[in-house]
Amino acid sequence: MTIADLPHAPSAVPASNGAPQQPPPKQESAYATALAQFDRAAQILNLDPGMASMLRSCKRELTVNFPVKMDNGEVRRFTGYRVHHNTARGPTKGGIRYSPHVDLDEVRALAMWMTWKCAVVNIPYGGAKGGVVCNPKELSPRELEGLTRRYTTEITPFISPEGDIPAPDMGTNPQIMAWMMDTYSMHRGYSVPAIVTGKPVNIGGSAGRFEATGRGIMFVVREAYRTFGWRFEGIRVVVQGFGNVGAITAQTAHEMGCKVIAVSDVAGGLYNPNGLDIPRLRRFMQTHQSVCEFDGGERITNAELLTLPCDVLVPAARENQITAANAAHIRARVIAEGANGPTTPEADEILMANNVLVIPDILCNAGGVIVSYFEWVQSLQQLFWEEDDVNHRLERILIRSFHDVYELAIRMDLDLRTAALVLGIGRVAEATRTRGLYP
């Protein structure tokens, strides 16, 4: 099979005509995007209305409001969520997000995408997601710990090693997972390491988990280049978002011999057409707040970063970054979705018309949940693997999953996103039929 066999796949980088600066993208509903994607795939699968209605809805939704005592003695109320989308293929799995922008619709969308993601890479989970409306950068370590422990207590009826296993996401990290694990364990009276994944290695975390999402993105990109017969060495990579996912993606791309020409964070971006010194930038970020303070390139806006001419664009920040407002100005050959839902359905249509290949989020960024699955298995067995073994297993699953999606795209004349959704939703529907209805 060649690139010509894949619908809408590009044969060359779109011509560079100089993209005008765009206004900030309109913040459309992530849940509306998730539902629109589902509806298209459900129609292709010809799901009966009852099955479609069931898979389109979240199984359980919890909203909690809880107090936290701040360092100055003030008591503040916070709102948090935990949503289970589907349990047909196993316990639910999904991250905890700390962000001022968290709302119930966003959590619903993320939980739904997690269901399809786990099915696409064929691990025995359903999708879940959680979040707390807060800005973690404005909280002291003590306040952050207090918030985490109280939130964990509030959602304890929803979570368990057998039923729902949280993990880190935007705004959370291994330390927060450690506090969650400890809180749940205190309630049980004994240590329960399998209640969360993404925790520190010294309390039962998995080697390679922290790097898994970013590393996995580049495994998938490299496999796509191999499959289409493109030269991978020296490709120009642009990464939007320099948090855990984006920074590790940039580091892995650098180690693979790619040229990372631009990165960004919430404050703006940095561009160097000759390539940024990613190891030095990562060391710099240990003591600085923004990539914009680094001396290795020209400062640009996030809007400008998205329209730079490059081979691979990795949106690794938030959802709804590539929209109808800016998609026509994307000058990447490939978009590798590091974030969940960074591209709207309207933007997908424009990108396909312009021959930009999109590797969808539910395939491209699945490395994190794959290694979370490995961590969960290790925690349950109390038998731990070496990092080389973790990385080898991760790469093998992602390569297999890429070809599952690619071959379905060829067979059914679909783009990669629709093929991934058809594959994932189809597997969940099949499991639902096999299990039957209770009672």
Image (cartoon, rainbow, N blue to C red):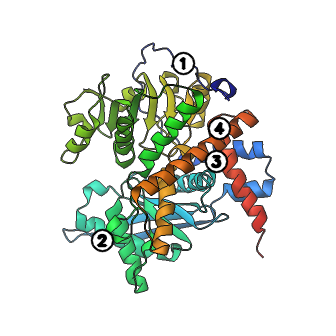
Q: CA distance from mark 2 to mark 4?
A: 46 Å
Q: Position of residue 415 (x, y in %)?
A: 65, 34
Q: Is residue 33 visible?
A: no
Q: Residue at left 58%, top 20%?
A: 11
Residue sitting at x 44%, y 36%: 314
Describe residue 49's horizontal placement relative to residue 143 as left or right: right
Amino acid of disc 3: Leu
What's the CA distance linking mark 2 and mark 3?
A: 35 Å
Which residue is denoted by mark 2 in the rendering? 146
Name the residue that disc number 3 marks: 35
Taking the spot 20% from the left edge, 72% from the top edge, the residue there is 73
Residue placed under numbered mark 1 in the picture? 12
Nearer to us of marks 4 and 3 is 4
The crowding category of the residue bearing disc 4, from other C-alpha atoms within 10 Å (few below 14, some 14 to 19, many at least 20), is many
User: Contact, CB < 8 Å: mark 1 with mark 4?
Assistant: no
What residue is disc 4 on?
406
Compute the Cα span from label 2 to label 1: 52 Å
Q: Are marks 4 and 3 in contact (CB under 8 Å)?
A: no
- Position of 84 relative to 265 (above/below): below
Earlier residue among tags 3 and 1? 1
Mark 2 and mark 3 residues within 8 Å of each other at the beta carbon: no
Instruction: Tell me: residue 204, above or below residue 85.
Output: below
Within-10-Å neighbours for mark 1: few <14, some 14–19, many 20+? few
| Label 3 neighbour load within 10 Å: few <14, some 14-19, many 20+ | some
Callout 2: SS: helix
Q: Amino acid at mark 4?
A: Tyr
First in sequence: mark 4 vs mark 3: 3
Q: Position of 197 compared to 77: left or right?
A: right
Specify the label residue 169 is tagged with: none
Q: How many marks?
A: 4
